[in-house]
Image (cartoon, rainbow, N blue to C red):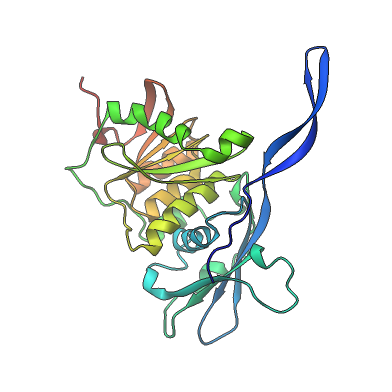
Amino acid sequence: MKEAVRRAAARVDILEVRGAEARRRRDAVAVEEPLEIRVCPADGPWVAAAVTMRTPGADFELAAGFLFTEGVLDHPAQVQAITYCTDPGVEQRYNIVNVHLRPGAAWDPGRLQRNFYVASSCGVCGKASIDAVTARGVRVAPDPGFAVDAAVLRSLGQALRGSQRVFERTGGLHAAGLFDGEGRLLRLREDVGRHNAVDKVIGGAFLEGAVPLRRHILMVSGRAGFEIVQKAAVAGVPVVVAVSAPSSLACEAAQRFGLTLIGFARGDRFNVYTGWDRVRTGS
């Protein structure tokens, strides 16, 4: 089944107040709906992986990216197909995605035993510690030949912002963009949850067999938390850039995983928190 074309924005009636004046008009808001992700082994019943509040669009990439970054899957060859749910009597079929595994595909159902819920604002509740992620062997492979010019890093924000089509209409979505080392935008996804946008970007690369992304840059609108750094590390992305601040746990995780973490990337300024050696400043 092909992915459905769903609305990422909806129209609502509002009362707009500007100073002493008020008027009624129609406005665009970002759509937020639940998405249940199911893993469907070839030799057994489906298993619920997660429920996330997301903006419809790139749902299959989101499902694949989530399962990959959470360590449930590690290679696209494990996936036979990704479909929406077609079970009889299911009304919200476009809010349920089934990830069908190939016969004999090995996967780790233990990763799903946490029975976690993914919220659009804060990521996975009860997330395992950095030590648990490190125990999976997650670490960005060093590449002494890869470094990014400061001028490239300064250009990313404008490229990201200029490609946020739904944000232009609603002002209510986060974005994640995947760039090459020269600052060319390769893939951009929007979502009400920044970690969902990252999963969509990484999921697309995963399904194409393009991971690890050893010579790429991931940029996110808003802040950089632990979840963003963890997902980038699993995908092998060496440089993570955020428009706003990183958290202390994100900095600690980036240091442990061998990432370059950059925050407050706005205009001609940015702060490098970890992995300074990958940034060429010219000074």
- Quarter of the picture holding the C terminus: top left
Q: Residue furthest left?
A: 145
Q: Looking at the image, which residue is at 68% across and 39% down?
A: 29
Q: Looking at the image, which residue is at 56% across and 54% down?
A: 57
Image location of residue 95, percent across then percent down: 66, 62
Rendered image quadrant of residue 117: bottom right
Looking at the image, residue 10 lies above or below residue 66: above
Q: Looking at the image, which residue is at 40% across and 33% down?
A: 159
- Quarter of the picture holding the N terminus: bottom right
Image location of residue 97, percent across then percent down: 59, 67
Q: Residue furthest bottom?
A: 43
Does residue 58 appear to the left or right of 233 in the view shown?
Answer: right
Rendered image quadrant of residue 73: bottom left
Looking at the image, residue 260 lies above or below residue 4: above
Image location of residue 154, percent across then percent down: 35, 26
**Nearer to us in this view, 140 or 161:** 161
Does residue 189 appear to the left or right of 208 in the view shown?
Answer: right
Does residue 184 appear to the left or right of 4 in the view shown?
Answer: left
Q: Looking at the image, which residue is at 42% across and 30% down?
A: 157
Looking at the image, residue 128 lies above or below residue 113: above
